[in-house]
Amino acid sequence: MRYMMFMKVDEAVYERDPAGETEAYAAMGRYNEELTKAGVLLALDGLQPPSAGARIEFGEGGATVVDGPFAEAKEVVGGYWIIDVRSHDEAVEWARRVPARKGEAIELRPIFEAGDYDPAALEAHGELSSAPPRQTTSASEA
């Protein structure tokens, strides 16, 4: 069973001095290594702040691009993991172990598998991959 864990953070986290965050980075590195050694980690990435991104909103007139930051956001997704575990309880246990700070949260969501869809819907959509990539990389790193 694949799950995505979203790390919800206060946007102010992006304003912190990285030099003062070495223990937090080390704790996260140890946690990520545990996921890797357990063989459950499929992918993970930290995300740049919303000010570096955009939101594409869809309405009557089609798509509209809204550049970040987004004033109404109280919390933002700071990063994610995709894990492959045997059960929902195991996914919850991994999420509980994230070295998050006070006020941060992990949102845990199961990922649809091909078998979760109606066969007619799959046919209309085309073939879905049941084997996600082991790790994400940017095109410039490939």
Image (tube, helix red, strand yellow):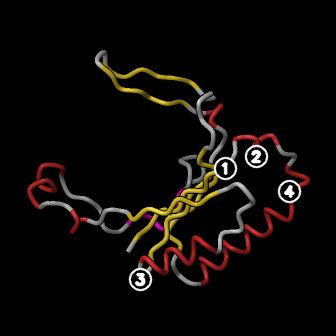
Q: Are marks 1 and 2 in contact (CB under 8 Å)?
A: yes
Mark toward the viewer: 4 or 2: 2
Q: Which residue is disc 4 drawn over?
A: 21
First in sequence, mark 4 or 2: give its number.
2
First in sequence, mark 3 or 2: give its number.
2
Q: Secondary structure at mark 1?
A: strand
Q: Residue 111: image x %, image y %?
A: 37, 63
- For the image, the number of numbered tags is 4
Q: Which residue is disc 3 drawn over?
A: 86
Q: Secondary structure at mark 2?
A: helix
Left or right? Give the position of 19 relative to 99.
right
- Label 4 environment density (alpha carbons within 10 Å; few <14, some 14–19, many ≥20): few
Secondary structure character of the magenta stretch overall:
loop
Q: Which residue is disc 2 drawn over?
A: 13
Which quadrant of the figure has residue 129? bottom left
Q: What segment carries the magenta color?
A: 132-136
Specify the amino acid type for callout 4. Answer: Glu
Left or right? Give the position of 22 relative to 40.
right
Q: Which residue is disc 1 drawn over?
A: 9
